[in-house]
Image (cartoon, helix red, strand yellow):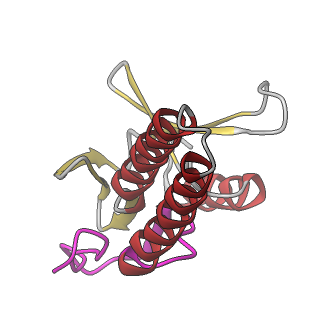
Amino acid sequence: MSHAELPPLPVESVFSVVSRRNSVLARRQRWTAFGLAASASFAVAVAFAGAGAWPVLPYSALEIALLGLAFVWVERRAGEWERVTVAGDRVIVERAGRGRLARRAFSRWWLRVELDEARAREPQLLLRYAGEAMDFGSALPPARRVEVARALKRLTVSG
């Protein structure tokens, strides 16, 4: 199973939502794009160096290194996801990121669902239980986050 695939649901669910970033390119395509951009930058730098402007080479190397770091950062974020599942008397929140999978289960009847709309264009979906707050859906569009909050409130008693 690749790092971007979701494991099967742990139980039969009434409601389940997955939140993950939109990844336009597959891993191989991302690294092909990086290789093409790095090759083009290096080719231009070598052409300038051949014309006598050799100080361009260190800047090209720095540019390629920074571009590589950006691609590594995007690669790490591509495999992150969140899932909230309502099953029986439990609400299960799963998160995968940085090579780890975390799972928390809450009582459906005691979980409080809040939508903090005080933030400027991005409402925040909070799940509160036993004095702790957990956000959910940071990768969801704001309108979808509001829909999920409403559905969760309907499915939990204290919503």
The residue closer to the viewer here, 101 or 116, is 101
Please give the name of the residue rendered at 36% of the width and 51% of the height, measured from the top-left corner: 72
Please give the name of the residue rendered at 46% of the width and 34% of the height, measured from the top-left corner: 58
Q: Position of residue 77 (x, y in %)?
A: 40, 52
Question: Does residue 18 show up?
Answer: yes
Please give the name of the residue rendered at 21% of the width and 76% of the height, measured from the top-left corner: 2
Which quadrant holds residue 29? bottom left
Q: Quadrant of the C terminus?
A: top right
Which quadrant holds residue 111? top left
Q: Main secondary structure of the magenta part?
A: loop
Q: Quadrant of the N terminus?
A: bottom left
Query: Which range is magenta?
Result: 1-27
In the rendered view, would you say 107 is above or below 19? above
In the rendered view, would you say 128 is above or below 31? above
In the rendered view, would you say 108 is above or below 19? above
State yes or no: residue 14 in magenta.
yes
Left or right, residue 151 beside residue 7: right
Q: Position of residue 52 (x, y in %)?
A: 60, 42
Q: Position of residue 25 (x, y in %)?
A: 51, 77
Number of numbered labels in the structure image: 0
Which quadrant holds residue 129? top left
State yes or no: residue 22 in magenta.
yes
